[in-house]
Amino acid sequence: SAPGRFADYFVICGLDTETGLEPDELSGENFEQTPLRRTFKSKVLARYPENVEWNPFDQDAVGMLCMPKGLAFKTQADSREPQFHSFIITREDGSRTFGFSLTFFEEVTSKQICSAMQTLYHMHNAEYDILHTPPTNDKDSCSSTGDCNGTSVSKLQRFNSYDISRDTLYVSKCICLITPMSFMKACKKVLEQLHQAVTSPQPPPLPLESYIYNILYEVPLPPAGRSLKFSGVYGPIVCQRPSTSELPLFDFPVKEVFELLGVENVVQLFTCALLEFQILLYSQ
């Protein structure tokens, strides 16, 4: 049986420099997109612990749900704000485990990956030129596209490309907590503080491994009807578990539902739920 820990696993997903840039089949192939706009396959790079008896690690599910859009690449010209999301893994017996992921961007230090991205751009631009270069004897086509003046779409596209000698390449990476209960706010704070410690010029008071060990082995699940306060990297973190006589745990801001769907849609959804209609939410 589960020992009642706050978290079961700490997971890192991202770019595997050994396998390199692999197209992500799940996201669909679109070679007309520039290489920086394509998605590439992410991998589970590390997890701790390796496995726990009461919650076997599902590498395929966790890897896919941590980074559902695969790897993303950006340059110094793009916005690189961290993004947080949650997910649920439901097993055959109906039991659930919860995941909370913080995705951020870090600089690519592998010269092989940078060279591979540069090669992809050379290939993309060459193919684009072949497809979009008008015939030499077609003056109307030349004047209408602006190729004769050196302002072709291909050159504009190159302006937004990657140059290994000029640009800094960044790739998405994800840190994740797998937990038995859905303490969203607490997990988000834990991950944000860990990320802050990694990116801060000043190291935290203790090694990062000690904070991860603490969250996995020393922080218990709060008993029903009780609150729990534990130490993060930079400050205390609090979570509360409802008692058996209260509504079930729902640690998500209801405000976001209204912001995303609007009041009328929320009322309609609530009505459908009361009438026991089938509800399907479709989203990217």
Image (cartoon, rainbow, N blue to C red):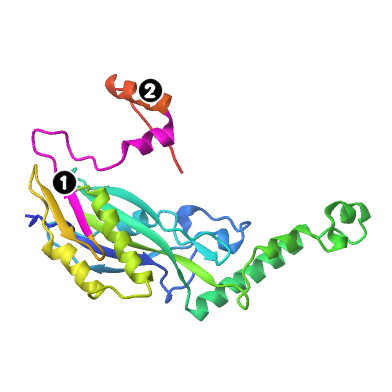
Q: In this image, 176 relative to 31: left or right? A: left
Chain-order first, disc 1 or disc 2: 1
Whether residue 61 is visible here, answered yes or no, is no
Q: In this image, 9 relative to 222: left or right? A: right
- Say which residue appears at 71% left-offset and 67% top-offset: 126
Vertical placement of residue 283 versus 267, above or below: below
As rendered, which of 32 and 229 lies closer to the eye? 229
Q: Amino acid at mark 1?
A: Gln
Residues at circles 1 and 2 in contact by the CB criterion of under 8 Å: no
On the image, numbered disc 1 is attached to which residue?
240
Q: Which residues are magenta?
A: 236-262
Picture coordinates of residue 77, whole percent (x, y): 58, 64
Instruction: Please tell me whether mark 1 or mark 2 is closer to you in this view.
Output: 1
SS at badge 2? helix
Vertical placement of residue 98 versus 70, above or below: above
Q: Amino acid at mark 2?
A: Gln
SS at badge 1? strand
Picture coordinates of residue 184, whole percent (x, y): 26, 49
Vertical placement of residue 87 versus 137, above or below: above
Q: In this image, 233 relative to 67: left or right? A: left
How many C-alpha atoms fall within 10 Å of the one at disc 2: few (<14), some, or many (≥20)? few
> Does the magenta-highlighted stretch encompass residue 258?
yes
On the image, numbered disc 2 is attached to which residue?
268
- Say which residue appears at 35% left-offset and 53% top-offset: 65
Q: Which corner quadrant of the image does residue 262 belong to? A: top left
How many C-alpha atoms fall within 10 Å of the one at disc 1: few (<14), some, or many (≥20)? some
Q: Single out the residue that lies furthest toward the bottom.
A: 111
> Does the magenta-highlighted stretch encompass residue 144?
no
Picture coordinates of residue 114, whole percent (x, y): 54, 75
Q: Quadrant of the N terminus?
A: bottom left
Whether residue 254 is visible here, answered yes or no, is yes
